Amino acid sequence: MTNFKKLAKSSRMSDKIVAAKDLSCPANILDQIILSPNISWESESGKILIDAISLHPNCPSEHLSYIFENRPESLQLNVLQNPGCPVDILDQVLAGDNSNLIQIALQHPECRKRNREHWRTRLRRLGKEFFELDEMVRLGFVELDGLENLEESYQELTRLKKWKKELNGQLDDFEVMLKKVHSLRIERIQKKREKRKKEKESEKKLAWEKEILRKKITPTYLGSDVSKGLEYDSIRKDVLKKSRLPIINNAGDLAKKIGITSEELAWLSYHRKANTIDHYVHFTIPKRKGGYRTISSPKPLLRQAQRWVLEKILTKVKVNSAATGFVVGKSIVDNARVHQRKKIVLRIDLKDFFPSIKFNRVKGMFHSFGYSEGVSTILGLIATESERKEVVFNGKKYFVALDERRLPQGACTSPAISNIISRELDSRLYGLGGKLGWDYTRYADDIVFSTKDDTVSATSVIKTTQRIIFEEGFLINDAKTMVMRPHQRQIVTGIVVNNELKISRRDIRKYRAFLHQYKKIGKLKMTKKIGRNADAFAKGYLSFINMVNDEQADKLTSKYKWLSKL
């Protein structure tokens, strides 16, 4: 069975032509093809496509009407041959003077149905005058007012002709007068029809433009697997106003607020499993403990949209006080200080934190704020993306989705969204800690419990935490679960918390080795070696050390005086 939906969504004109030439293609698919963006109707493939559509028996009547009114005679002939040709178009052609179009229109089943009775039979039954006038009435050239039926008009005409004959030529001017009256009537009817035609054309054009605008402002389809429930009436303005969040009625409203066009918003949010462009720039950075992390940095237009969502929506939503990562006014030092000088420190790492938060959860989050399903879907699409693989097919590059859409590592919206979605997780774990006498914080994917009581067992806390984390839709990296006691080095978010907050000796040695190498081989070679700007790393890590323990920073600057000149 032909997958018409797939052919219609395809970016290749050849696929769309195949669907349009298949007589079993349904009307909704043809409508989707006609309304597809970026089709050049004047190209050779575009002409082939519209030629097939104009002949297709399932083509919607509104599109046939638009093609007939706005396309050349060759396509008009196609429309007249189409079994679904609107009756008003047939009437319009029959009332005109284009013999080519009239000839084709007369062959249409609808016209044949009207003229089922043979013209010779009608002529014998009605008489010559009756037949001629009947044809003029049928074709719309004459309107008979004030008579109940056509026979009465011809009876009246017969009586007049009889009187003329009886008057022996005294009424020679009667025929001239009658023709003049008929001529004036026909002229009036033609003007009326022309006016009606122009009004209808204007109405059709306006309706067409309104439909295109509606689909831009309130799109009902944004790609497979993400278009369920695309409606815009379920907005809860009272909830949004209470939370001081912006009112967004539809896609057009959102685009205006962001400062982009509706077309640009549709381009950014439309989900394609195989795309010819990628809205992100991907690169890797080394992890602190080995390996590499893939960063997906949004391109300028998407970054603009994500920045607006972050500033106008996400930053206005409160998160749990236990969340210390990506929160204004909090830092890793604040996170570490909670667990300073504790008898037991329990650290649990969430596996694939950002990627584990998928599109449906993000969409549901925006919907919980009070936004409609449609707007929530668009916001969710802006903030998520699938992992994609670059492939080449028929000489053309495609970016193919490998999985579901999820939070990308590198989008400015991802940290804030992760904190909001983790509110229930934080609330449950904070409550668990309070019940058992443990302090709790979470810095991104790093969960930490600590207690001053060295007699308690961490096993029950670990098991309950694992269960809660699983119930909240997250996974644990078991390899990174650690229970740290006073005789061990207790590290929280890279900071030693046993006594005074400080950077570990191992990390200080690594930094000193970096500085030594930097001084020896220079900035350029060091930048190439570490894969990032050496100056920025040197200054940045020194600032981090200073934020944690200024004494450690002072020792470094006194030994490496050239650091202050960077």
Image (cartoon, grey):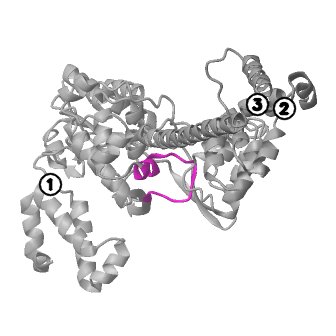
Q: Is residue 74 left or right of residue 325?
A: right
What's the magenta region?
263-280
Q: Are marks 2 and 3 in contact (CB under 8 Å)?
A: no
In-front residue for pair 201/372: 201
Q: Is residue 521 magenta?
A: no
- Quarter assignment of residue 145: top right
Q: Position of residue 473 (x, y in %)?
A: 42, 30
Q: Which mark is residue 502?
A: 1
Quadrant where the C terminus is found in the figure: bottom left
- Any mark on residue 133, and which? 3
Callout count: 3
Which numbered dot is residue 112? 2
Going by the image, does 23 lie left or right of 35? right
User: Which SS class for mark 1?
Assistant: loop
Which residue is pictured at 14% across the width and 38% down the height? Answer: 338
Instruction: Tell me which numbered mark, 3 or 1, is placed earlier along the sequence.
Output: 3
